[in-house]
Amino acid sequence: MTYFAAMQKSSFTPPLHFPVSLAPICQELTSQFALIPANRQSILRGLIDQIIETKQQGNPVKIIVICTHNSRRSHIGQLWLQTAALWYQIDEVTTFSGGTEATAFNHRSVKALLEVGFPIEQKSSGENPIYHCLLHPEDQAVDLFSKKFDAPANPQKDFLAILVCNEAAEACPYVPGAKARLPISFTDPKAFDDQPEESQAYLNKVKEIGREFLWVFQEVSAALQ
């Protein structure tokens, strides 16, 4: 579906400077909020409440998305949370990611994110390459590489910590500096690595995480109006 065809399906107007390549997938996923089960909405509600509270206090929202290796779900979540904030025009939201250990931003995740329209470019090579993603022309590109959640590149206090895998949640019963610790687990697409279903599994996971985090910011937007 072209960008213009997607725009005709909804009266929602994307904000100025929103990446054209991402508008169709955002339109698709925001039309699918009914697919989010009630139990998932209940889990996500804690994040919604924390973002609303932080905004009402007049403070910037900083979110670190944490999984074990900072290779798949945490990077996907970081990008979708930032994108959702831009889509619903919630300012002063900055997202980060990290792991309980550092490995690399998995190339399968990168491929799936590129497929749905994220403007990602690889800027270095090696075992833990650095990628850039420019979501707004007036902002600095987001640096994407695997790191521990307490790395200097991430905030050290007054942030929301989202644990997107059970292993990280178990390894981090306490996240130093976090204003709130929020377990929001997603199943790992790694189970499909090197299988015929690999590409579709990663694409499905990108869409699932995007759908839920877009819903989060729709709820935040409605509450702040």
Image: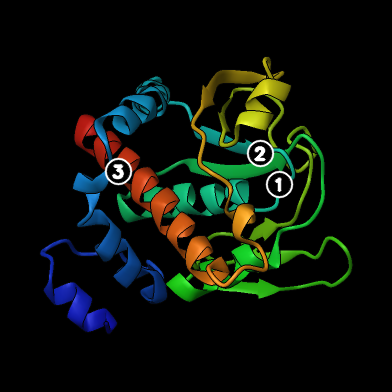
Position of residue 126 measured from the top left corner of the image (x, y, whole percent): 89, 68
Q: Is residue 47 left or right of residue 187?
A: left
Residue found at the very far front of the displayed protein: 196
Report the Cα–Cα distance between label 2 and label 1: 6 Å
- Mark 3: give few (<14), some (14-19) or many (20+) Cα within 10 Å: many
Looking at the picture, which amino acid does disc 2 mark?
A: Cys
Disc 2 to disc 1: CB gap under 8 Å: yes
For the point 30% across and 71% down, the residue is 24
For the point 39% across and 69% down, the residue is 22
Report the Cα–Cα distance between label 1 and label 3: 23 Å
Q: Is residue 82 left or right of residue 223?
A: right
The picture quadrant where one finds residue 95 is: top right
Q: Is residue 28 left or right of residue 115?
A: left
Looking at the rendered structure, which numbered label has been put on residue 70?
1
For the point 55% across and 34% down, the residue is 62
Looking at the rendered structure, which numbered label has been put on residue 67?
2
